[in-house]
């Protein structure tokens, strides 16, 4: 809602712009400095604009009074029907769900939004207040779902941004909800200590399934995320250049990622070519070569070796980070770039994406050699 002080402070710009008050009422500021009270509505499928005069000749109070009278007199037939929250939710889910590739995530999105946002279902979307949004997300966290509450705040903002983009509403109060929510506790990924690495890498060689064993070894040597290994495709590999180029849509940060391939990884891929070369996937399912190995194949192999609660596939990233930062001479920026961590500085991030490749090639070979040394240490401890 606008105040008189805000109205007086609206300055002309090169182009006209709008500032909204309430119930669709807004003031349009022209380059000439004229401030015009207006309201957009639909009648018989036509987009129309009602004007109430110029500010300050028509005061804020007068504009609101005229607006209320117009809306009352024009009747529901002439005013465009405002969606309810349930109608917006269904439209947004229809738009959003296909963008999620994981079926579980698709189902979870609909279930969570349907369950936790039910109190808003019958509310017109242009009348939902900030307090109502806050009540929804805080109720989720009060039920012990800390991270779900934060996700719900994000979903509500995305949903109402979608409504604005579609022209259903001009503005909303669903932004900034994270500021009233608790932060989830940071989960520490299970990862062995460096002095336990020799036994771990020796144990990996005992995995009976060759494709699974090679999958774990590739994950350990490249320290990428689990799904990036699992969905690795032959057409992503430039073996002549010893490069694996992971497309942006597979990366957590949605940026393409270059993984230099060490001698050890090249040897694993040479063997995998014999095993799965006719499939699109490097780690093809043994039961259906058209699909990759199942979601928990690699993790279950670690559990079978007795590492449940001690090591995960993601833990190889933590191990690599620890080793490279504590035992190698590579610059921290080179290490972070190869780990594909989020860069907070956008300018620096753009620079890092293009640089450090020669150093990263050396880094990847150094780390694979370190793993080889650890495997040997298991047989000949110092």
Image (tube, rainbow, N blue to C red):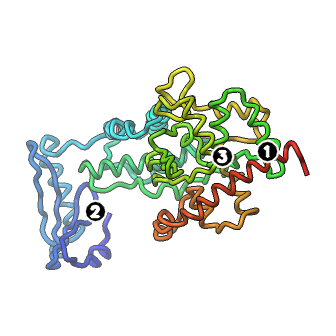
The residue positioned farthest toward the front in the image shown:
240
Query: Mark 2 sits on what residue?
Result: 21
Left or right: residue 121 versus residue 137 is left
Question: Is residue 132 shown to the viewer in this render?
Answer: no
Q: Is residue 67 above or below residue 162?
A: below
Which of the two residues, 258 or 144, is positioned nearer the viewer here?
258
Which of the two residues, 221 or 39, is positioned nearer the viewer here?
221
Residue 183 rendering spot, x and y as whole percentages = 61, 54
Where is residue 173, by image quadrant? bottom left
Q: Residue at x 60, y 56 (%)?
A: 339
Question: Is residue 285 shown to the viewer in this render?
Answer: yes
Nearest to N terminus: mark 2 or mark 3: 2
Which class describes the residues within 10 Å of circle 1: few (<14), some (14-19), or many (20+)?
many
Q: Is residue 74 above or below residue 57?
A: above
Q: Residue at x 60, y 53 (%)?
A: 182
Which class describes the residues within 10 Å of circle 3: few (<14), some (14-19), or many (20+)?
some
Residue 260 rendering spot, x and y as whole percentages = 56, 53
Q: Secondary structure at mark 3?
A: helix
Q: Secondary structure at mark 1?
A: helix
Residue 122 rendering spot, x and y as whole percentages = 35, 37
Query: Mark 3 sits on what residue?
Result: 264
The answer to whether mark 2 and mark 3 are in CB contact below 8 A is no
- In three-dimensional space, the C-alpha distance between marks 3 and 1, rounded to whole angstroms, equals 13 Å
Question: Where does the N terminus fall, quadrant-wise?
Answer: bottom left
């Amino acid at each position: 809602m606008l105040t008189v002080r805000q109205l007086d402070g609206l300055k002309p710009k090169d182009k006209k712009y709008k500032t909204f008050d309430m119930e669709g009422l807004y003031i349009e500021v022209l380059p000439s400095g004229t401030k015009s009270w207006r309201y957009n509505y639909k009648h018989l499928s036509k987009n129309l604009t009602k004007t109430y005069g110029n500010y300050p000749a028509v005061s804020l109070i007068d504009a609101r009074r005229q607006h209320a009278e117009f809306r009352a007199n024009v009747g529901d037939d002439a005013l465009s029907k405002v969606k309810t929250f349930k109608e917006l939710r269904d439209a947004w889910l229809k738009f959003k769900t296909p963008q999620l590739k994981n079926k579980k995530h698709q189902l979870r999105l609909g279930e969570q939004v349907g369950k936790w946002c039910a109190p808003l279902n019958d509310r017109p979307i242009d009348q939902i207040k900030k307090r109502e949004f806050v009540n929804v997300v805080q109720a989720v966290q009060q039920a012990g779902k800390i991270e779900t509450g934060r996700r719900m705040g994000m979903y509500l903002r995305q949903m109402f941004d979608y409504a604005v983009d579609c022209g259903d509403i001009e503005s909303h109060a669903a932004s900034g909800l994270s500021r009233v929510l608790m932060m989830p506790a940071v989960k520490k990924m299970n990862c062995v200590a460096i002095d336990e690495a020799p036994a771990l890498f020796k144990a990996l060689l005992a995995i009976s399934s060759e494709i699974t064993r090679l999958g774990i070894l590739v994950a350990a040597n490249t320290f990428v995320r689990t799904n990036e290994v699992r969905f690795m495709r032959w057409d992503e590999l430039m073996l002549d250049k010893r490069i694996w180029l992971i497309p942006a849509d597979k990366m957590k940060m949605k940026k393409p990622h270059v993984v230099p391939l060490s001698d050890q990884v090249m040897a694993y891929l040479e063997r995998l070519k014999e095993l799965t070369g006719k499939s699109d996937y490097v780690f093809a399912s043994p039961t259906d070569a058209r699909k990759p190995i199942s979601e928990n194949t690699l993790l279950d192999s670690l559990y079978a070796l007795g590492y449940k609660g001690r090591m995960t596939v993601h833990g190889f990233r933590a191990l690599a980070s620890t080793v490279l930062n504590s035992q190698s001479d590579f610059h921290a920026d080179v290490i972070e770039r190869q780990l594909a961590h989020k860069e907070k500085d956008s300018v620096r991030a753009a620079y890092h994406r293009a640089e450090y490749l020669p150093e990263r090639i050396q880094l990847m070979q150094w780390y694979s050699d370190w793993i080889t040394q650890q495997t040997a240490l298991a047989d000949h401890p110092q």
